[in-house]
Amino acid sequence: MNWLSRIFHRRSLSSELAEEMQLHLEERAEQLMGEGLSRGEAEQAARRAFGNRTILEERSREVWQWPTVESIWADVRYALRQLRKSPGFSMTVILSLTLGLGATTTIFTFVNALLLRPPAVADAGHLVEVMEHNAKASGIEAYMPFSYPGYALIRDHNHTLSGFAAFDGDPRTVSWSHDGRGQMVFGQLVSSNFFSVLGVEPSIGRFFRDEEDKGGPGSPTAVISYSFWQRQLAADRSVLGRTLVFNGASYTVVGVAPPSFTGILIGSRPDFWAPLTMTPTLIHDPARMGSDTSFWLFGIGRLKPGVFKNEAQADLTVLTRSTHSSDPNGAVMDASAFPIQLVPGPFRGYVAAFTGLLMAAVGLVLLIACANAANLVLARATTRRRELAVRSALGASRFRIIRQALTESLLLSMMGGAGGLLVAYWSIPALLNLKPATIPISVEAPLDWRVFAFAFLASLLSGIAFGVIPALRSTRRDLLPALKDERQVAGPRRSGLRNSIVVAQITVCLVLLISAGLCVRSLFNARSIDPGFSTHNIAVAQFDPGSLGYTETQDSQFYQQLLERVRALPGVSSASLSDYLPLGTSRSLQGVQIDGFAPPPGQDSIHVQVAYIAPDFFKTMGIPVLNGRDFSPEDSQPGWHGLIINQAMANHFWPGRNPIGLHLKVDKEPMEIVGVVKTGKYRSLGEEPLDFMYRQMGSESQEYLVVRTGGGEEAVLGEVRGVIQSLDPNVVPMEMESIGQYMALPLFAAHTTGVLLAVFGSMALLLATIGLSGVVSYSVSQRTNEIGVRMALGADRFDVVRLIVKQGMRLTGIGIVLGLALSFAATRVLAGLLYGITPGDPLTFAAVSLFLGAVAFISCYVPAHRAASIDPMKSLRAE
Amino acid sequence: MMILESLRRQPAHGYALVQHIQQRSNNLLQVEEGSLYPALQRLLKAKLVRADWGVSATNRRVRTYQITAAGRRHLEQEISSFERMFAGITLVLNPGKPAAN
């Protein structure tokens, strides 16, 4: 009899045993009858001699059982029956947990995507990411990528790495010319040993060879990503050897990366990789490879066997220091090695702080959900006292009953966890949509095994958390009163635990709501901050025809024609160009020399942020010109240049004076101030006024086109696209968006935190409301008798309502006081995310407390009202 | 061990086994008769005995147990180890007398 047939023949096994034992008893009885006993006496004696038949049968069966598994399975089946019997209770617990676990799993999915998921490389444990680190600086600014000569030195002279590769940290927007048009794709420049150091194997074809790094740009090669191959090239296997035109140069495809490999930096998903030797061709920067002052390469080293990270770091530090020994600033550059991660080492702290904040918020939501579940289970345990008492009277051990109770709560929490995974599955795409579509990064947040493991563990822990205390409590009491069906008055001691759970819920809920309130108000503040330019009716597009190999003359011709044609479009009131948009990610500073102002020590000039603009920029952007005028074509002549400054700079250097007509030197060129414009926000919405100046546009290749419309930016952008097509179909606008979409980026952090915390806060409120009204309803049901007596003795409905509501509101009050105290401490961590509001904002604290109090009142009043409608006669008769 | 020993002499069904053991031990061993059955199930599981349904002399459906080859081996080992233990106990209780074997 094998185990499978044993399971299926379990029934026949029991019946066989029963038959056998029955036979035994009959034979014994017959024999005793033969010895002269009556039938009745004989049967009794036989049974006595045989022993407890039920236990013996059970023990015989147990021989065949897989004992623990089978009894657990029995527990599970029993638990399922119990849960089905009270669907309201089960659904409330499961839904509470689904909310809590769903939120937690969702946020964990992001933590996993950003911080835990390793890049798809071989033996990541022996790979290190290397950056230069300025020992004298602090924070993220201290870390720097390598220059090419710096990288090459380490590659050739280190003693601790078996291979040292490098990649360009910026994803390059590249125009891919095919079928007579251009298309925007992402390219990444990598050293020829990039793939071999990472230990990645190509899907088809090969990766780069060493000589492709050494020689000049002979015959350029490229490796394409698997998804690019699938999406754009129809997974054609004959792609190997084909030529693709990127930024005007031809590349021969030599290989396709494996599907799992999407680069090793979070957010950047290159469509193709090209060897570093192609740098001059791909990004039109011929000097970069030889420059020891351009820092742009991230290093990746594979440790030699037996070498530890710290040894490698020491070895590389010697080399980096030697490259910087002639640095006039005397910066001491060490090498810093980090374990390889999708988010590079120095940035992990920031990402961890942000996701940690969200994790803490959802953790609180989960806590409230667990508290709800615990409360419901406690309440139910009380109604099931009789059942438990009967079971222990029949001989169930305390352990067995606790195990049964835990099985039930684990079953509930596992269902909640499964629901939570569904919630995560649906909410992750929605959350990814919070990211402005125009940020050129793609984040993946896959539900991989880590997420499943996390959801399982979180469910397990929640199940134990909310199950174990009710289980212990419900098995502690005497059996007799329960068996005698004695009604117990809900005394203060008995409800103490439930009450403290509710107080804790209110406390945590208030902390979450106050945090959410602060973030939402901060979001509105941020939206209402005047950035100094109009945030409506402006369309923005960014171009870089230089990437197609345009010369300076071709560049200016292109832009000149573009401006003329766009200005002529219907619905366009003005258009201009600028190499910079306020609140963008780039910035450039220039040295300014002003008579009467000494530069800061150690520098030869004062540095002020600068932008190069075409005429009509201020009109188009809605920036008021306060004094003087906008640029005109005559302002740029050899030996004389006009300059426009902002009000902050005018106040800074020439307080109380009219700066128009004054002279100064910018970048050692003489300039005359021709206008003053309103001060705006340049780096972040929260900044203090910054000095800023505008120069007349020269021949920059990369420009923003800004277009003022009468409305309907989308339509205008479509027209602009048509204009570009007719000018040069290979030019690809890197970004095309309305100013509203553009503003999504500076508001991103505030927006995301605001939305998420508002969602979590509402969930917490919902859960706490359920918890509170649950406890109040329960106490009403326990006190039906008492209420009946009171009413019979003359209490009116209002007295009853007051009695019940008072009880609930007392708990709420305690919770709110504790919550306020805790919030003062907790909201400090939010300080960095808030605009125009202090973490201890009294208005938010007061308003949220009142709001929570009001919601709590309603959730007490409803059951209280029901209690007051009790017919006293009925409730007394129920006794 | 007693069950195996009884079964080695002849196959039997449950009640017959109890009878046999009680007679052989001159009713010195008083145990619950029913405890035979869990023991039989353990032996069945360990494949030391085999069970077949048959019809008894009194024309009842009975399950008859038979010792298997593995059961015989097991029994011999058990007996010899039991005898060793018994010899040891005897030595300790009667230190003057050498053990019987």
Image (tube, grey):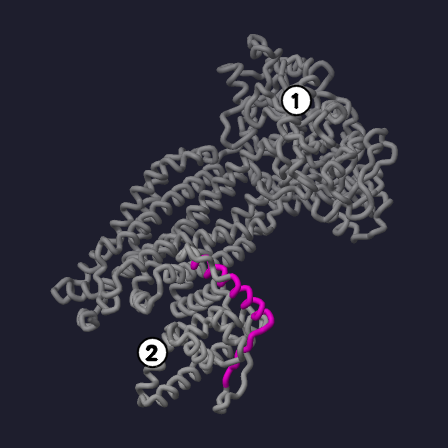
Q: Is mark 1 on a helix, strand or loop?
A: helix
Q: Which of marks 1 and 2 is in front?
A: 2
Along the line of sight, the residue nearer the viewer: A742 or A136 = A136
Say which of A267 and A71 sits in front: A71
Judging by the rendered image, the residue that carries numbered circle 1 is A317
Place residue A171 in its image quadrant: top right
Q: Residue drawn at (84%, 48%), measured in percent from left and top?
A: A239
Q: Which residue is drawn at 69% across and 32% down?
A: A303
Residue at the image position 69 percent from the left and 46 percent from the top? A718
- Report whether A143 appears left or right of A99: right
The amino acid marked with disc number 1 is Thr
The residue type indicated by label 2 comes to Arg
| Magenta stretch prevailing secondary structure | helix
Q: Is mark 2 on a helix, strand or loop?
A: helix
Circle on res. A48: 2
Look at the image and give the residue range highlighted in magenta: B62-90
Asked if residue A818 is among those painted magenta in the image, a careful observer would answer no
| Image quarter of the C terminus of chain A | bottom left
Asked if one can make out residue A567 in the rendered structure from this viewpoint, the answer is yes
Q: Classify the position of the N terminus of chain A by image quarter.
A: bottom right
Image coords of residue A509 (percent x, y): 37, 47
Seen in the picture, residue A789 relative to A528 is either above or below; the reply is: below
